[in-house]
Image (tube, rainbow, N blue to C red):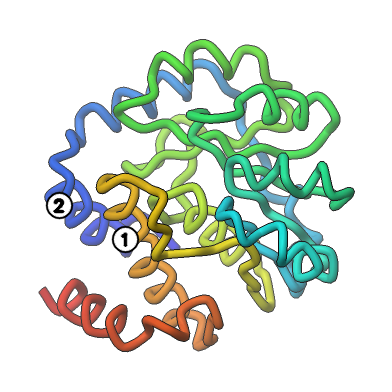
Amino acid sequence: MNFETFEPVYEAILADFGFDRAADEHARDVAAELSTPFPFSRFDRWDGAVVAVAGAAPCLRDEIGLARRADVVVAASTAADVLLDAGVDVDCMVTDLDKNPDTAADLTARGVPVAAHAHGDNVPAIREWLPRFDADHTLTTTQAAPAGGVHNPGGFTDGDRAAFLADHAGADQLVFPGWAFDDETVGPMKARKLDWAARLLGWLERRRTERFSVLDDRRERVTRELDALLDG
């Protein structure tokens, strides 16, 4: 996905949350100063593969087998810790550095790519952690326009960004262990972000002409919201 396609949805996210686009762009520029270009050819093995996009919901522990059977495993945030503890290799971690950046640093040191996301609220974490990562295995991302080696493959939360990254890398099929859109343990802000994650997965599903089973119990709602978003 190119940014021109993603931008109207990004603008809707900014409007809904009251986020500052200039702050996102500043974070992107900070990340660009602290990172080196990451060649997407490192994801060649994902082309044509079954990719597990692992979310960090508690149900992940019951769905480890779905990740284990996939060709490639992309973990969102703390899902990486759960998978690694279960003996499942992680092929990439996607994070905005808010929970377990030490895991991300360790993975890059072991040669595992990490997609580190820069947004308006995490500049201190970007400044602290990017220098600790192995630069050769760190892909920096933004939700604003890509610039200076910082990419935007699409997406908003760690989980749906992981799905958009897998799509960008040519995945043939996406499966979704560890996802729960109606997690009652999360606060209001996280719940709103999960709603957006569902909409974005619905958009990706539509673009890929693929049905994601993780959306089966809310597809009608997601379709309605997505139609209003894209037609608006």
Kindly indicate the quadrant of the structure image that contains residue 144: top left
Quadrant showing the C terminus: bottom left
Quarter placement of the N terminus? bottom left
Q: Is residue 17 left or right of residue 178?
A: left
Local crowd at mark 1 within 10 Å, few (<14), some, or many (≥20)?
Answer: many
The correct choice, above or below, for 116 with respect to 228 in the image is above
Q: Amino acid at mark 2?
A: Asp
Q: Is residue 184 left or right of residue 120?
A: right
**Label ID, residue 196:** 1
What type is the residue that disc 1 sits on?
A: Trp
**Residue position for label 2:** 16
Name the image quarter holding residue 139.
top right
Q: Position of residue 169 (x, y in %)?
A: 64, 61
Residue at x 19% of width, y 52% of height = 11
Whether pointer 2 and pointer 1 mark residues with C-beta atoms closer than 8 Å, the reply is yes
Farthest residue to the front: give it: 185
Q: Is residue 23 shown left or right of residue 36? A: left
- Label 2's element? helix
Identify the disc placed on residue 10.
none
Q: Residue at x 58, y 56 (%)?
A: 55
Number of other residues with Cα within 10 Å of mark 2, as a class: few under 14, some 14 to 19, many 20 or more: few
Residue 220: image location, x then y, percent: 31, 88
Label 1, secondary structure: give it.
Answer: helix
> In the image, residue 166 lies at what x, y percent?
62, 61
Quarter of the rendering containing residue 7: bottom left
Q: Residue at x 51, y 81 (%)?
A: 208
- Distance of label 2 from label 1 (alpha carbons): 10 Å
Report the side of 154 relative to 228 (left or right): right
The residue furthest right is: 87
Where in the figure is residue 10, as x and y percent of width and height?
26, 53
Q: Residue at x 78, y 61 (%)?
A: 72
